Amino acid sequence: MKILIGCEESGRVREAFRGVGHDAWSCDLLPCTENPSKYHIQDDLIKTIKSQKWDMIVAFCPCTHLAISGSKYFAEKIADGRQAAAIKFVEDVWDADCPYIAIENPVGVLSTKSKLGKASQYVQPYWFGDRHRKKTGLWLKGLPKLTPTNMLDISKISDKELNKLYLLAPSPTRALMRSKTPHGLAQAMASQWGGLV
């Protein structure tokens, strides 16, 4: 399958799909620094979606103006149009001419303010062997819900480790660090969705 991983600077999901034999490409406005590759397209995602036919799109759309964690800024973002523009971007990805689409985003306004409606499922990194917590929504078109692959007993993990993403000190790279897809989740996407076609 020809698979586009959208808004992915890290290349983790791209590499997971390539690892199981698919022609996977990542696309982001930023360069791919964690896993540099000729299979990374540094360009606008919507432009890249329209440039050719894709069999599957997995998109990690920016959540800055959508996530409930930033709700204290919502009035300002609604007034100046940032939230509406962010929702339109997600809806444009969702409307792509592609049979299999997954959109990932944390808990936020997509369920109530976008045409996507309620998330198909919410997942946690610790379902897939990653030792932290981050409730994340998946909106799925043509794809099944993910099944946990390595459920960790979080009662045996300290709160500090479970919440390490939330506890990151403010820095220029904090948002980027928090947005990286956990390795276990990336592998689950590739192994479970990659075998569909």
Image (tube, rainbow, N blue to C red):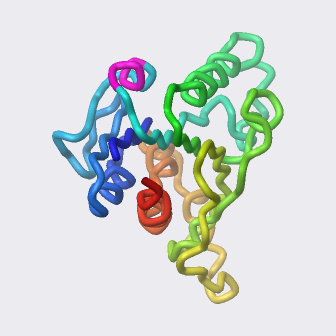
Give residue 91's quadrant in the image: top right
Looking at the image, which residue sits at the far left?
Answer: 38
On screen, residue 23 above or below 50: below
Give residue 149's quadrant in the image: bottom right
Q: Position of residue 194 (x, y in %)?
A: 42, 57
Give residue 61's quadrant in the image: top right
On screen, residue 26 above or below 46: below
Residue drawn where x is 65% and y is 61% of the image: 123
Q: Give the range drawn in magenta.
A: 47-52
Residue 50 drawn in magenta? yes
- Type of secondary structure dominating the magenta stretch: helix
Residue drawn where x is 36% and y is 24% of the image: 48
On screen, residue 116 above or below 81: below
Looking at the image, which residue sits at the far bottom?
Answer: 156
Q: Tell which of 106 and 73 is nearer to you.
A: 106
Residue 11 drawn in magenta? no
Residue 7 horizontal side relative to residue 96, left or right: left
Residue drawn where x is 60% and y is 73% of the image: 148
Residue 46 horizontal side relative to residue 161, left or right: left
Q: Tell which of 26 and 100 is nearer to you.
A: 100
Q: Where is residue 2 in the image (x, y as percent from the top left)?
A: 33, 42
Residue 140 horizontal side relative to residue 180, left or right: right
Q: Tell which of 116 and 123 is nearer to you.
A: 116
On screen, residue 44 above or below 133: above
Q: Where is residue 62 in the image (x, y as percent from the top left)?
A: 54, 34
Q: Position of residue 22 (x, y in %)?
A: 30, 52
Looking at the image, which residue sits at the far top?
Answer: 80
